[in-house]
Image: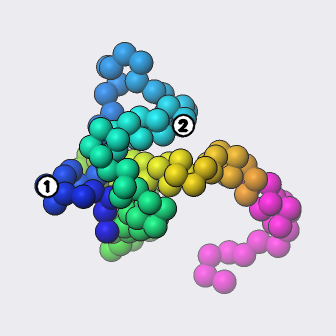
């Protein structure tokens, strides 16, 4: 399921970055990126389709498309995926799609993604203290 109403709509609701555009938001400016995504959707009248359910489904689909790139690679091949220009481009596009849908979902639900992540890291630090028992791969 996608967030697009039209079959001839672009596959992704992610606006293409333009590093040369004056005032383009930087990578660390999440609120500006969220606003840009919201403006992009609003200009196409996609807001009715950007429900939490649809955005979560689209996020899942895009995450699966990212997984698909690595599906049949060995661990060694997967570690070198960015060495190939074609696969690196695909990875960057799917990462962008995943992040875009996650940011749109956070916007719709009123979740601050950086606050949520900081709180989760803190809980994990309490749950899994450094120096605790560690498992090795395959255990």
Mark nearer the N terminus (1 vs 2): 1
In the rendering, at what x and y percent does residue 9 appear? 19, 52
For mark 1, what is the residue? 8
Horizontal side, residue 127 vs residue 105: left or right: right
Give the residue drawn at x 42%, y 41%. 38
- What is the crowding at mark 1: few (fewer than 14 residues within 10 Å), some, or many (at least 20)? few
| Residue 132 magenta | yes
Q: Quadrant of residue 36?
A: top left
Residue 37 vertical position relative to residue 73 in the rendered view, above or below: above
Residue 108 vertical position relative to residue 126 in the rendered view, above or below: above
**Which residues, given as a range, are shown in magenta?**
121-139
Give the residue drawn at x 44%, y 60%. 51
- In which quadrant will I find the N terminus? bottom left
Horizontal side, residue 23 vs residue 4: left or right: right
Instruction: Report if residue 41 is visible in the image.
Output: yes
Give the residue drawn at x 30%, y 46%. 45
In the rendering, at what x and y percent does residue 48 appear? 37, 55
**Secondary structure of residue under mark 1:** loop
Q: Which of 122 and 50 is in front in this view?
A: 50
For mark 2, what is the residue? 30
CA distance separating discs 1 and 2: 29 Å
In the rendering, at what x and y percent does residue 56 appear? 46, 64
| Residue 56 magenta | no
Closer to the camera: disc 1 or disc 2? 1
Horizontal side, residue 128 vs residue 16: left or right: right
Instruction: Report if residue 99 is visible in the image.
Output: no
Horizontal side, residue 116 vs residue 15: left or right: right
**Secondary structure of residue under mark 2:** helix
Give the residue drawn at x 34%, y 44%. 41
């Amino acid at each position: 399921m996608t967030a697009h109403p039209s079959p001839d709509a672009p596959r992704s609701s992610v606006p293409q970055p333009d590093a040369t555009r004056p005032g383009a938001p930087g990578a660390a400016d999440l609120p500006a990126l969220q606003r840009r995504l919201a403006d992009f959707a609003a200009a196409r009248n996609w807001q009715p389709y950007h429900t939490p359910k649809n955005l979560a489904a689209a996020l899942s689909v895009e995450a699966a498309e990212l997984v698909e790139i690595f599906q049949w690679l060995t661990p060694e091949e997967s570690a070198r995926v960015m060495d190939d220009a074609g696969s690196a481009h695909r990875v960057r596009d799917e990462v962008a799609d995943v992040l875009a849908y996650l940011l749109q979902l956070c916007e719709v639900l009123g979740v601050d993604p950086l606050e949520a992540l900081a709180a989760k890291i803190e809980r994990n630090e309490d749950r899994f203290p450094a120096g605790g028992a560690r498992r090795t791969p395959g255990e």
